[in-house]
Image: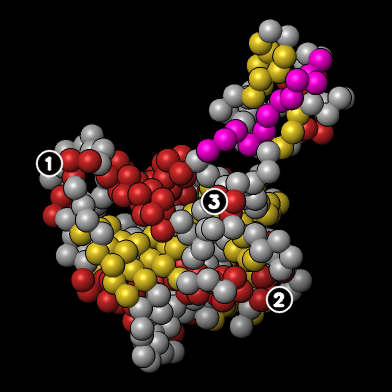
Amino acid sequence: MSAPVYVTSDCTGCQACVSVCPFGAIEMKDGKAVITEACRACGQCVDVCPVGAIIMRETEEKETKDAKGVMVYAEMSQGELHKVAVELLGKAQELATELDEPVYAVIVGNELDEAAAELINRGADKVFVYDHPELKQFRDDPYSDLLAQCCHEENPSIFLVGATSIGRSMGPKVAAKLKTGLTADCTSLDIDPETKLLQQTRPAYGGNIMATIVTPNSRPQMATVRYKMFPEAKKVDAPTGEIVKKPVDMSKVTDRIKVIAFEEAAEQVSITDADIIVSGGLGMGEPDGFKLIEQLAAALGGAVGASRPTVDEGWIDYRHQVGLSGRTVRPQLYMACGISGAVQHQAGMKTSDVIIAINKDPEAPIFKISSLGIVGDLYEVVPRLVEKIKEHGQDA
């Protein structure tokens, strides 16, 4: 792949480009500017050059126009498809419809027949399978090698990976092998109607702004995408997709880690998968307020969530945080106690089936998205709720 930017013989050696490059990708050699491999094609040097000696290379035909297909990495979790894979497949179908391209899924692991069939049943046009006993446990090296190999062979225009702990670790390695860009932790994906580029939107600056990023000069356009952002792909009545089993030669892939044993982590509160979440905010007034939140969550059989300010104050661990800079959740019931409802928090829970808010302030933004709002002191309301639930059960 050629460098995306190059310098012509018209360069005067003024060094104006050196000072503006945010990646330190321009060096001076023999009085001329030289673009290094660190270049990310941001174009700032092109704009600043007083003699027009820096040129943005035209996108190569193979890198863009020949690329076709929206591909999803179908992550496995404890021998089953991770739900984020089915969510991404649904979004991939939406994007592929706008582009008039096929939908692909790629899966790596061991004993994958059932998972591959599930992807076909949910509408994938092709499922590429890398099945080998030595791939049963995830490792960055072999997985990223095989995914990069699949992208080289199939040349998709878009490649989506779940922003799980595995996806966040492996995704950048795949992008580096493919020499393409990667937008991490996306919360929204759209197709620009004019350019047909993938618009990848993610929170920035602690969720205070939303950045929309495109990848114009390389393929595939890669993104890791948050769990619980999109609905799952639905099962189709008459699936017509094809399962393609790819050969696996472990001697030809990198594998620097030997798995000696595997033990599941001790069970922890998982707000991501919870059907019921009760969250507390700064409106509780003190960290002991979470004791009340825990009582209500226990009575409902749910998990405890929290707003970012309570985590910042050290009232509760980060793993409970809901919002753009925390977890995105989609429970059947979300209860917000003492949470005003800043836009960053809403973005992490507004797709919940039912939202109940308890807040003293009748003008709190959380009430605008709530199915039911209770204006009152949570220290009066919550104990009564707990009492009634214990008396009559969860249907109270």
Label 3, label 2: how far apart the Cα atoms are:
49 Å
Q: Which residues are magenta?
A: 1-12
Q: Amino acid at mark 2?
A: Lys
The residue lying at 41 percent from left, 50 percent from top is: 152
Report the side of 208 relative to 227 (left or right).
right
Q: Secondary structure at mark 3?
A: helix
Mark yes or no: residue 213 visible. yes
> Which residue position is annotated with label 1?
260
Q: Are marks 3 and 1 in contact (CB under 8 Å)?
A: no
Q: Which residue is mark 2?
A: 368
Q: Quick one: label 2 or label 1, which is nearer the N terminus?
A: 1
297 vs 63: above or below: below
Q: Is residue 88 left or right of residue 370?
A: left
Quadrant that contains the C terminus: bottom left
Q: Nearer the viewer, residue 139 or 248?
A: 248
At x 36% / y 83%, what residue is drawn?
Answer: 240
Identify the amino acid type marked 1: Ile
Q: Nearer the viewer, residue 185 or 18?
A: 18
In the rendered structure, the answer to whether residue 62 lies left or right of residue 89 reads: right
Q: Which mark is residue 32?
A: none
Looking at the image, residue 75 lies above or below residue 45: below
Residue 331 in view, yes or no: no
Please give the residue where the numbered disc 3 appears in the rendered image: 62
Nearer the camera: disc 3 or disc 1: 3
Give the color scheme: rainbow, by chain, secondary structure or one colour: secondary structure
Q: Provide residue 106's location: percent of width, then percent of height.
A: 35, 62
| Residue 87, percent from left and from top | 45, 71
Mark 3 vs mark 1: which is more N-terminal? Answer: 3
| Distance from the alpha carbon under mark 2 to that under mark 1 | 52 Å
Label 2, secondary structure: give it.
helix
Discs 3, 2 touching: Cβ within 8 Å: no
The residue shown at (63%, 36%) is 4
